[in-house]
Structures are given as structure tokens and as C-alpha cells.
Image (cartoon, grey):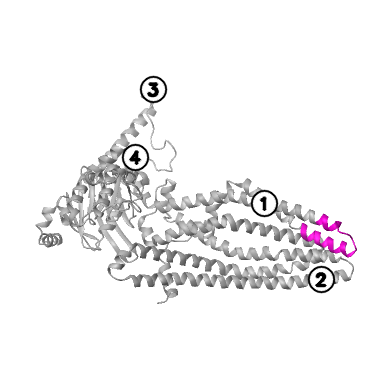
Amino acid sequence: MSATAAAPETAARILPTASRRRVLAAIRPLLGRRLGLLLLIAVAGLVTALTGLVGPWIVGDLVDELGAGSGLRPVVTGAVWILAAGILGAVGTWLGRWWMGALAEPAVAALREDVLDAALAVDSAVIETGGRGDLVSRVAEDARIVSDAASSILPMFLQSLFVVVVSAAGMSAVDWRLGLVGLIAVPMYALTLHWYLPRSGPIYREERRAFGVRSQRMLGGIGGAATLRAYEAEHVELERIDDASARARDLSIDVFRFLTRAFSRNNRAEAVVLSALIITGFWLVDGGSLSAGGVATAALMFHRLFNPIGALVGMFDEIQSAGASLARMVGVIDLPGSAAERALAGEAPRDAAPAAAAERALAGEAPRDAAPGAAEVEPDAAGPTAGSEVGAAAVTARSAAGDARSAAVPAGLLLRGIGHSYEEGRPVLTGIDLEIAPGEVVAVVGATGAGKSTLAQIVAGTVPAREGTVLLDGTGVRELPAAELRRRICMVSQEVHVFAAPLAENVRVPRPDASDAEVAAALAAVGAAPWVAALPAGTATVVGDGGHRLTPMQEQMLALARVALADPEFVVLDEATAEAGSSGARDLERAAGAVLAGRGGLVVAHRLSQAVTADRVIVMERGRIAEIGTHEELRHGQGLYARLWEAWTAR
């Protein structure tokens, strides 16, 4: 299949792009706070454009005066005027660009921060589905394009626009009939834009999309280099990268051809109108209603429009490209639609509202949109009045409701009717009901593809279940503010990221203010103290990219030490000891046991030895809970777990 044919399938998996209306809504508040700078930019642009009229006007006067036999005095005077106008225009251009930078750069920086905030807050499943390469392309390359446009392209665009408007007015000031002739260019340029604009947006969006796919392919190939070498499959991935690069290259060439056609239309308009001006000018001079200098002035003013109009059309190229990049950045900000955006805004997610409302009703609390004080009436401190009786009744009612809530919603984690799918018609989880009491550890076992990792992510609150609810002490996990959720539930997976920083800073990720003693205690709790002491600079040793290389076991211990430092109520371990190999398996299992001690936990077990120490074991098969019970109950049964255990112990 060709790259072009494969593109739609690939594009369907990348992250969304915001609409034009949404983009305008996103940048309006960023610019609205700087209206003073906008006014100064307009004044500077107008002054600069007016100074540009001095040259054509002086030349026109010289044509008339020198033709009448004047000396060099008009030439010297004209040169002084042109020099003064040039200096003033240069100052205006400099000030305009400086003010534009002061306006645009902070706005672009704020936008980039919003994109990064949203990318860090969005559900990991969304990023993985869309592709990390596409996200990196939006945060890095698209942000660069928008920044370049704001600092270079936009000032030139505004300056050219001012020059076009002022020069057109200047032509009319020379002679209104020449101004009418100049208007012939308007429909011709309008036809060019009418042809250009509807085609430019889609082609630039497609170009930016192709760049994102190319980045995604390249990052995937770099990240999987070891695997590709192991299977001698480098050529397969290189072909995919080459296809993605070829599509991006072909689209860039198409864009250049498209832009060349637009310029040719402009050149045609310039030739037609300039010829019409000269012919009309000859007729006016011959009739004695205009001097040759006036015609020269008008012709030079129109000729002065060539570069600005060409720049306007040419910069539509850059502006459309920047607009496409801006739409992709805003698309990241809007990613969740949802959980990430509402978490950034401090709002509860919509899918948690019904559960939250039910819990507040059980607790005797008023709905959030009720008037202040509607939920309760405080007793009168002065004595037993009617108001105090109402207050006492309200307190009693709340107490009773609280008892009812305690009876109806047990403490700990509660999963009811959980169902999930990544694609329509292909469920990953179906009808999952599970309770995990505080301090209880539940192990999850099952074949690959049974839904274990998806269940772990839903419990941790990183992936919203499409069906059902997950409650933590009676509150929906998706309703909790992000900071509180991460403080109460921590998750460790097989993939551990080690930041390029000292080891101590890596441990402090969940608690940046933790002391050195607390970091050391967390490392000791998971059994990492011996190998940390052997590092060149102990906890001050720089690890990660460019630093000391940690083994897979040490990386997993580092991740578990973060959990120990965070001290959450519940811990989710998604095969967190799977990467260590047999030599470090026991050490990691002891570390995981230390982290789980005194806490509730859900452990996706890579080895059945992890299930032995769990309080309960659930066996998953095709997205459903097939068995549930203690290790002893299940291994003596006749089900799937008994067969798995028999195979495990027979090794």
C-alpha cells in the first residue's frame, strides 16, 4: 500500500485538531489583556506606511521640476526628505516589531504552558492511542512554528497590510481616476484569494498532520531499536518511516507548487493594472488634466504595492501553516473534553456527576447548585427556639443519612458494573464488580489480553471506565481533584521513567518537599539502600539519560520508593516486578510487599508467587472475573487458577 493510501488509516489514530472558532476563543483572552500594545502596534504601522509615500511623491515632483529646467536644489531637498522619512520609517518598524514581540511572545509562552499542562493531565490511554510522536510534534514543532509566526510573520503581515491601504489612498489623492484604475486590481486579487484560501487550509492541515505522523514513526523506531535489532526487522520499520517521510515531503512539494500558482495569479494582476495605469496616465497627460510627474507618482505607488501584496499572499502560506499548528495545539488543550480540562479547571468530570450526586444525597448534602445554607440550618446558640429545633432536626437527619451512607457504601475501593472498550464492539472489560477493603491486597491473574492492565488503570483513575463507577470511600475517583487522587492512589507499572536528575530528586517526584532523611527512609523501606550506597555519589548521583545507568531491578525499586514516600491509601501494581528477571525477582517481591504493608492494593501478578501472599485472588478471562477467592481456595478447586498453579509449580 502506498504512503498516500495508508495516510487516512494512520491519521485516524492521531490527536484531534480544534475548530477555527475554538482557536479564536482560546487566543482572545491572551490578547485581550494587552489592548494598549495592540494600539501602539497600529500607530507604528500607520506611521511607517505613511513614510513610504514620501519617495514616490518626491520622485513625481522631480519629474515635473527637472523637466522645467530646475537646478539641483529640488534634488537635494528631495533627498533630505527621503532620508528623514527613511529614518522615521525605520524607527516605526523597529518599535512595531518590539511591541509585537512584547504582545505575542508572552501569549505564545502561555499557550505552550497550557498545552503542556493539558498533555500531562490527560488520560495516558488517550496519549498512547493518539501517539506520543504526534504529541511531541505539537508541543515542540507546532509551538516553534506559532512562535516564529508571532515574532516574524505577523509583524510583516501587518506592516504589508498598512502599506497596501495607505498606498491605495495615496493613488486616489494623486488623481481619483487613477485611483479607480487601481481598483481593477481588487477583484483580481480577490479572485486569487478566493481560489487560494479554501485550498490552503486543508493542504496545510494535511501537511502538519503528516509531520506529526512522521515524528510518531521516528520516535517509535528509536524507542524500539533494541527490539528491531533483535529480530533483524530494522528494514521493516525503516520502510514505514520512509513512507511517512515521503508523504510529508510530497505534501511540502505540493504546497510549494500551490504557492507558485498563487503568485502567478498575482503577477498577472500586477501586469494588467500597471499597464492600465500607464495608458490612463498618458490619456490624462495628453488632455492636460494631469502632469507626467503625477502619473509617475501613481505608477510608483502602485509598483510599491507589488511586494506587500505578494508578501500578503505569500505570508498567507505561513499564516495558514501557523494557524494549522495553533489548531493542533489547542486540540491538545481540549483533549479530554473532559477529565483533563475539567481537572485543570478544578471541576468535577461529567461522568462522575451522577455518582457524586447520589453520594451527596446519601450524606444529606445539598446539590452543588443549591443556594448557600440550603443544606443545613445551624442551631441557635441562644437557646432552644424554633430555629434550633429545625437545626437539631437537620443535624439528626444528617446523622441518620450518614449512617445510611456508611451502610450503603463501604470504605475502601468499590467497583460496580465496570465495562470498558477501546473500540466500539470490542469490549475489554464487562460487568466487573469488586470491593477492596482498606489494607486488603487483591491479586489479579489471567492470560495476556484478559483485561488486567485496563482494570488496574481504571482503579487508579488514569482511564475512565465507559460503564459503571469506581468509588473511593464513597466518592467517585474521577470526581476527586487530580492532586488528591494521586495522593490517595498510586500506580506503578512495568514501564518506569527515570528522569535525568539526581537519584534523590527522582524519588521526590510525588513529594518535592521531602527531606533527605525521608528519601533515605523510602529507599531503605524497599531494600534499595545497599545499591544506593554503592553509587558514585549516593543519592546525589545523576541517573537517567546521560547519567549513571540503573538496572531494570533498580529502576523498579526506584518506582516503589516513590510510592513509599508518597504514602498513599491504595497502591496499584501493574506487573511492577516483571522486568527484573529471575535474579532480582525475590528482591522486588519483597520491595512490593513492603510498599503494600498496611495499605490496600491491587496487584496485577506476573508470577503466581505474588498471588500467594495476597488476601484474595481474582482470575480474569476475556474481560470478566472468572474466579475469585483466596489462593488456597482456588488452587484446590477445579477452575482456571488451579490449572495455572499446577503449571506454575511444575516448572
Q: Which mark is residue 280?
A: 2
Q: Is residue 634 left or right of residue 99?
A: left
- Location of mark 4 (residue): 364
Q: Residue furthest top?
A: 382
**Above or below — where is 173 with respect to 508?**
below
Please state, as top left, top right, bottom left or bottom right, where the N terminus lies in the image: bottom left
Magenta stretch: dominant secondary structure: helix
Which residue type carries mark 2? Thr
Residue at which label 3 appears: 382
Q: Residues within 10 Å of mark 4 (few under 14, many from 20)?
A: many
Where residue 590 appears, as percent x and y from the top left, is 18, 48
Q: Please, what secondary structure does the residue beneath circle 2 have?
A: helix
Q: Secondary structure at mark 3?
A: loop
**Residue 313 magenta-drawn?**
no
Q: Nearer the viewer, residue 518 or 458?
A: 518
Q: Position of residue 445 (x, y in %)?
A: 20, 58
* Circle 1 residue: 42
Q: Are marks 2 and 1 in contact (CB under 8 Å)?
A: no
User: Mark 3 near mark 1, Cβ–Cβ under 8 Å?
Assistant: no
